[in-house]
Image (spheres, rainbow, N blue to C red):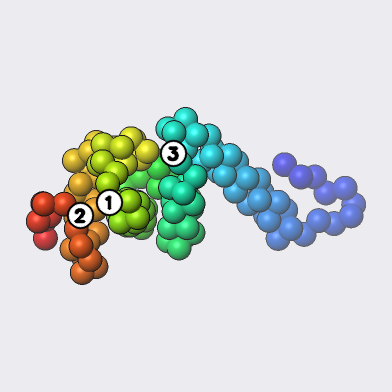
């Protein structure tokens, strides 16, 4: 994409420019997705923090990826949202992640069980 103009751009610098473009596009995509789903700001911040912690893209957490690292981040984000406001319904949280409410119940229960935390559900989850 970038042509050598005689100045001699290093391949590392060009790679960094490409990475910056990808990250900027990812941020815009994630922002638009969350806006379209009506995600409140405090939930957005939680999702961004968890995605950064797990070194995954926010769009992956909100998307359909089934990679272990992404699923772990998604479950943690759902759990933290429910833990912050236990009165939130599972269907509402599921809507923000474009999931079924039963998937959200499982995610919260599973994350709680695996980490020795309250499950916030009456379900015992799977082991």
Q: In the figure, is residue 86 to the left or right of 18?
A: left
In the image, residue 64 sits, relative to residue 42, either above or below, namely above
Sequence-earlier tag: 2 or 1: 1
In the image, residue 6 sits, relative to residue 114, either above or below, namely above
Residue 102, visible in the rendered structure: yes
* CB within 8 Å, label 1 to label 3: no
Element assignment for label 1: loop
Find residue 46 and report its horizontal and vertical position in percent: 44, 53
Q: In the figure, is residue 121 to the left or right of 26?
A: left
Q: In the figure, is residue 52 to the left or right of 118?
A: right
Q: Which residue is mark 1?
A: 86
Q: CA distance from mark 3 to mark 2?
A: 21 Å
Element assignment for label 2: loop
Look at discs 1 and 3 and give the one toward the viewer: 1
Which residue occupies the extreme top position in the image? Answer: 36
> If the image is split into quadrants, where does the C terminus sit?
bottom left
* CB within 8 Å, label 2 to label 1: yes
Q: CA distance from mark 1 to mark 3?
A: 16 Å
* CB within 8 Å, label 3 to label 2: no
Q: In the figure, is residue 47 to the left or right of 115?
A: right
Local packing at callout 2 (Cα closer than 10 Å; few below 14, some 14-19, many 20+) is: some
Local packing at callout 1 (Cα closer than 10 Å; few below 14, some 14-19, many 20+) is: few
Which residue occupies the extreme front position in the image? Answer: 87
Find residue 70 and report its horizontal and vertical position in percent: 37, 53
> If the image is split into quadrants, where does the N terminus sit?
top right
Sequence-earlier tag: 1 or 3: 3
The residue sitting at 44% across, 39% down in the picture is 39
Labelled disc at residue 39: 3
The residue sitting at 19% across, 49% down in the picture is 106
Local packing at callout 3 (Cα closer than 10 Å; few below 14, some 14-19, many 20+) is: some
Q: CA distance from mark 2 to mark 1?
A: 7 Å
Q: Which residue is mark 2?
A: 120
């Amino acid at each position: 994409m970038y042509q050598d103009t005689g100045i001699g751009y290093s391949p590392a610098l060009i790679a960094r420019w490409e990475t910056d473009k990808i990250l900027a596009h990812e941020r815009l995509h994630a922002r638009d997705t969350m806006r379209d789903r009506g995600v409140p700001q405090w939930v957005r911040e939680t999702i961004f923090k968890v995605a950064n912690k797990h070194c995954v893209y926010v769009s992956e957490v909100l998307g359909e990826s089934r990679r272990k690292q992404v699923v772990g981040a998604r479950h943690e984000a759902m759990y933290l949202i429910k833990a912050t406001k236990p009165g939130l319904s599972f269907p509402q949280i599921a809507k923000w992640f474009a999931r079924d409410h039963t998937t959200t119940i499982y995610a919260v229960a599973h994350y709680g069980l695996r980490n020795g935390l309250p499950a916030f559900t009456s379900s015992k989850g799977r082991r």
